[in-house]
Image (cartoon, rainbow, N blue to C red):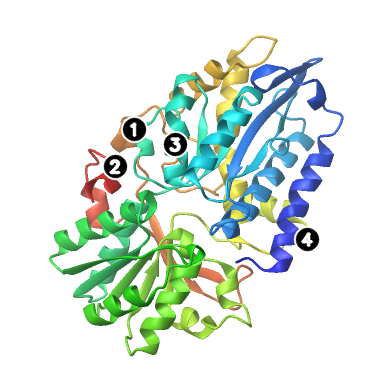
Amino acid sequence: MITRNARVGAIAGVLVASLALAGCGREDEGGEGVSKDGEGGTISLGTITDLTGPFAGVGEPFTAGQAAFWEDVNDAGGIDGWKVDVTKHVKDSGYDPAVHAELFNEIKDEVLAIGQSLGTAHTNAILEDATADKIIVGPASLGSNWIWDEAAIQVGTSYCAEAMNAVDYAVEQGAKSIAVVHLPGDYGDDAMVGARIAAEANDVEFTDIETGPVAAGDDQAAAVRAVVQADPDVLIVAASPQELGAVMGGAFQQGWQGQVIGSIPTWNIALVADDSPVKDLITSAYMQATSFPTWDADVPGFEAMRAAAGDQAPNDWFAIGYASGYVMKAILEKAIEEAGDDGPTREDVYNAAQELTSVDSQGTLPEGTGNYAGEPNEQAVRVTQLNKVDPDASGKISVAVEPFVGPTAEGYEFTEPCYEMK
């Protein structure tokens, strides 16, 4: 659901990065993603993402943002002479967990780590094998389970904690009833359980509404009827932009008038394009919950991101993809420093991740990111900001509520993944 300009820009970004790495020894690449060349060499990272499925609007610009980040790093000399290639092993899962696992097996012998693995269930499908092989994985997903997995280098607030904060905010604004429309599975269930925990903590009415994906041909009529019947003050949506638009549009057509707060993946700039049938509705009634700064954020890292974007149309998924690179860079810096002249091994990278306590992301990542050495509840990022549609903002959203941690998330002790508590 991204615009044509954004789509072209995303693909162009990957191609530019790929061309920039030509001649860096990639064709002589050895096993496990490390190729020695003089004082340094090339490190290959894998990407398994969604380029054609329901979250292509996330996967394409996110992948391009990561490519732009590493192009900047490589142009500045790399990491102690080592260049990083994120363009050779990019695979499209179409948002299918089984395909995701197949693609991981296809590339795992050729990469040092997985720089992007889009999807919660999808990443879970490869995590056991990745852990066994000491392969670090960067989830492009905010499942609450990553804090227990040594191989996962999670970035940002989980869907569960994000939903807790959204409910706490809604109650503070006077909401007496909350409903959640969500996709089945780890992502949607994670947000639903977080919202339910916060609703119970605040003693407000709660309704759980499950829906299937538009991309699979599922009709949203049942979800629309359930929203109208429940008549919540605030509706939280944990789905893709397609379900968000279908459910919001249908519910408002049938007379429901409430506030909608969407989990981070619900946003896509195409929702407010001139030809979008829900443009006015999204503009007036929707807020996005996230833990990441917006495209226009006045932080050094995003100044670099905007410069690196070139002709890429402003897109917050590109920005988050760029920002995520700081985590892998910090891990590789530590691994390279401790490795021998032949470069880091998978175990070097794995061990370096376990030693990391923080990341200097130049303001691009939420507070608390990168403490992989801590206990699970110390690793959990809990901050959320709420964005509103803003026609004057480059990415069409701007901050409506500054980053905060609500009382539910602040005091919550994670003992198991939220989605397992469904």
Q: Amino acid at mark 4?
A: Asp
State if disc 1 and disc 2 touch (CB < 8 Å).
yes
N-terminal-most mark, 4 or 1: 1
> Which residue, as the protein is rendered here, is positioned at the far left?
203
N-terminal-most mark, 3 or 2: 3
Residue bearing the label numbered 3: 125
Query: Is label 4 in a helix, a strand or a loop?
Result: loop
N-terminal-most mark, 2 or 4: 4
Q: Is residue 285 above or below residue 300?
A: below
Q: Amino acid at mark 2?
A: Pro
Q: Amino acid at mark 1?
A: Trp
x and y, in percent, of residue 22 in the image: 85, 34
Q: CA distance from mark 1 to mark 3?
A: 15 Å
Residue bearing the label numbered 1: 148
User: Which numbered mark, 3 or 2, is in the foreground of this view?
Assistant: 3
N-terminal-most mark, 1 or 3: 3
x and y, in percent, of residue 395 in the image: 61, 67
> Crowdedness of circle 1 by 10 Å Cα count: few (<14), some, many (20+)?
some
Residue bearing the label numbered 4: 311
